[in-house]
Image (cartoon, helix red, strand yellow):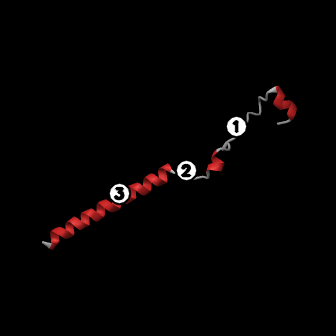
Amino acid sequence: MSNRKGGIREITLVFTLALLGVGLAMLAAFTPWYESAHAESTIVDVHIPLFDPPDMAAQGK
């Protein structure tokens, strides 16, 4: 009879660890990997050197 309780305990442990692993994977996938202050700034600045609007060209930007 102790084999049956040991099997149930082992299955419960495996499912608990699996749920913990899924929870950690979701936490890693859905939390931002950068600070929120940096999230507001532009990550990539797109600049096309062949076309500058007249006001931007006069300012030297």
Extreme residue toward the left, this view: 1
Inter-mark Cα distance, 2 to 1: 23 Å
Q: Which mark is residue 19?
A: 3
Is disc 3 placed on a helix, strand or loop?
helix
Instruction: Give me the disc on residue 46.
Output: 1
**What residue sits right under mark 2 in the picture?**
32
- Where residue 39 sits in the image (x, y, percent)? 63, 46
Amino acid identity at mark 1: Val
Find residue 22 and report its horizontal and vertical position in percent: 39, 55
Measured Cα–Cα span from mark 3 to mark 1: 43 Å
Say which residue appears at 16% left-offset and 68% top-offset: 4
Which element is circle 2 on? loop
Q: Residue at x 20, y 70 (%)?
A: 6
Depth check, mark 2 against mark 1: the one in front is: 2
Q: Is label 3 or label 1 in front?
A: 3
Question: Looking at the picture, how far across and down is residue 26, in whole percent?
Answer: 44, 52
The residue lying at 24 percent from left, 67 percent from top is 9
